[in-house]
Image: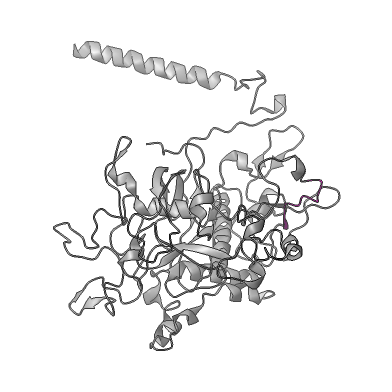
């Protein structure tokens, strides 16, 4: 019997090898035209096999799915802005931890090195607001001087960062990660002397406006060219880092993947862990706080010799226990910016799939001859909003959108206008019927959502369904962020 099994195994191996050899000799052809691909003899059209997306530095895959978004406990603040509703979230990547002080110092160092000589305001604008620690009736001066810069706080989350600054950081991180990938793949050389507009930017590279220190160019199979740059179609470059949407952040925070069997979610969660308590129930860690929060009035860390969360302010980003996705501090420590513009009735307006409010559709600026405009003095491509007055955009033929700025889409009708008693003013205020943003009201197109509890909060805010808002150019000493990235292809990772 053993000899028979061995013989069958040998035959099977030989057949497999033969199949591989035959398939390797077989010409690659188009399934619709029959023409050969990946050969200059037929024009050089390239088809690159793609198997699995590379996980970017710092990221963890969050497998998507359906969940109930919104409040799952009593609305004690009576805002009624997060009524439960069913949402579907695509798989995406999210930072394992909040962005740290050391991460932000690396960012500012790069900006100072590249722009500091001629455009010092660039890195000055990127500095976190250390004065966010000030309080009229608290002695917080040491945090003003030391929290961001001292190495003792390197692993602590960066705070005092606005939504605008966090968004700029994500753009910079996209460029640096993709530049390193091109260096790792032998396409570019390391260039530590980049300055001003001569710096790697993903958009300018893809549009042919950045050369860099080339180490080994890609061979172009197009018989009319000899070499080419890396393209999106090659599958080498990673998608852009960005802030997560509100639905993505809430879905990831709940971590319900740990409570599912087949298609059943066995238990809902109030927090990123099971149960209605905020202490660890396991025998080894029984009684330990699950998050960095304020337990009661005036109790920020507990009693000496038995500190309940061992953190008077923030805590290092890998403190406590990760949720079932492996994400740390999705409750407590610092609240986190998300991409969405705040509206109290987002639950009624947003789509059921990948819900998000805040779309502003833009395109690259071109000259009269149809060529992309040269990058600006900082090395960025020139962008503009999609304009219906520009015949190039042909928005009059579109059915899915009619304007570039869609933040206030479905905000209200004529009767909702602040000028509803004055027809002339109401007509002049088209585009801001519900919210008169010129007066910078509490809710405007510049008001962004932030999620999760923080070291100053009580337990109520630990629930991922809770939501608050702040102007995009403001910051707090208890507000940070983490980055997300789109997942291409299959929502499930290959094992």
Viewer-nearest residue: 429 or 257: 429
Residue at figure coordinates x 39%, y 45% from the top left: 67
**Above/below status of 10 relative to 432:** above
Position of the N terminus, as image quadrant, is top left
26 shown above or below 244: above
Quarter holding residue 336: bottom left
The x, y position of residue 53, in whole percent, is: 48, 42
The residue located at (42%, 72%) in the rendering is: 478
Q: Is residue 453 left or right of residue 48?
A: left
Between 240 and 481, the one lying in front of the other is 481
x then y, percent, for residue 193: 63, 66
Viewed as shown, does residue 377 lie left or right of 75?
right
User: Colour scheme in the image?
Assistant: one colour
Q: Is residue 226 magenta?
A: no
451, 310: nearer the viewer:
451
- List x then y, in percent, for residue 369: 86, 48
Chain part drawn in magenta: 383-392
153 or 323, which lies in front?
323
Judged from this view, the residue extending furthest toward the front is 421
Image quarter where the C terminus lies is: top left
Q: In screen coordinates, is 443 left or right of 1?
A: right
Q: Residue at x 53, y 57 (%)?
A: 340
The answer to whether residue 410 of the structure is visible from this angle is yes
């Amino acid at each position: 019997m053993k000899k028979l099994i061995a013989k069958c195994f040998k035959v099977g191996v030989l057949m497999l090898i033969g199949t591989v050899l035959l398939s390797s000799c077989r010409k690659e052809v188009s399934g619709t035209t029959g023409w050969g691909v990946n050969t200059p003899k037929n024009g050089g059209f390239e088809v690159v096999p793609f198997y699995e997306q590379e996980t970017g530095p710092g990221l963890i895959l969050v497998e998507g799915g359906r969940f109930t978004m919104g409040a799952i406990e009593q609305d004690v603040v009576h805002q009624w802005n997060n009524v439960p509703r069913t949402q579907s979230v695509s798989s995406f990547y999210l930072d394992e931890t909040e962005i740290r002080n050391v991460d932000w110092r690396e960012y500012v160092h790069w900006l100072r090195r590249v722009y500091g000589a001629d455009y010092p305001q660039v890195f000055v604008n990127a500095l976190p607001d250390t004065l966010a620690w000030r309080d009229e009736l608290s002695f917080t001066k040491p945090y003003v001087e030391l929290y961001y810069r001292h190495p003792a706080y390197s692993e602590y989350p960066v705070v005092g960062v606005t939504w605008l600054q966090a968004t700029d950081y994500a753009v910079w991180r996209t460029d640096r990660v993709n530049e390193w990938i091109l260096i790792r793949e032998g396409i570019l050389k390391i260039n530590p002397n980049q300055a001003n507009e001569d710096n790697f930017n993903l958009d300018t590279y893809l549009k042919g406006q950045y050369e860099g220190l080339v180490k080994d160019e890609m061979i172009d199979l197009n018989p009319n060219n000899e070499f080419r740059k890396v393209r999106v179609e090659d599958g080498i470059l990673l998608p852009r880092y960005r802030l997560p949407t509100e639905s993505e952040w809430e879905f990831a925070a709940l971590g319900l993947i740990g409570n599912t069997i087949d298609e059943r979610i066995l238990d809902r969660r109030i927090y990123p862990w099971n149960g209605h308590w905020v202490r660890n129930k396991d025998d080894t860690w029984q009684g330990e706080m699950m998050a960095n929060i304020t337990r009661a009035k005036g109790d920020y860390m507990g009693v000496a010799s038995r500190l309940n969360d061992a953190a008077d302010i923030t805590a290092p980003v890998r403190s406590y226990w990760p949720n079932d996705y492996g994400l740390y501090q999705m409750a407590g420590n610092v609240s986190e910016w998300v991409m969405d513009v705040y509206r109290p009735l987002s639950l009624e307006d947003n789509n059921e799939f990948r819900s998000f409010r805040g779309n502003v559709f833009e395109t690259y600026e071109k000259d009269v001859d149809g060529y992309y405009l040269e990058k600006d003095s900082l090395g960025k491509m020139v962008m503009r909003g999609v304009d219906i007055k520009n015949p190039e955009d042909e928005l009059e033929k579109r059915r899915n959108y009619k304007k570039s700025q869609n933040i206030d889409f479905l905000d209200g009708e004529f009767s909702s206008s602040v000028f509803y008693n004055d027809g002339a003013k109401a007509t002049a205020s088209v585009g801001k019927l519900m919210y008169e943003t010129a007066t910078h009201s509490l809710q405007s197109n510049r008001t962004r959502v932030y999620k999760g509890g923080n070291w100053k909060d009580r337990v109520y805010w630990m629930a991922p369904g809770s939501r608050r808002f702040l102007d995009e150019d403001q910051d707090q000493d208890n507000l940070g962020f983490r980055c997300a990235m789109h997942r291409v292809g299959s929502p499930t990772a290959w094992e």
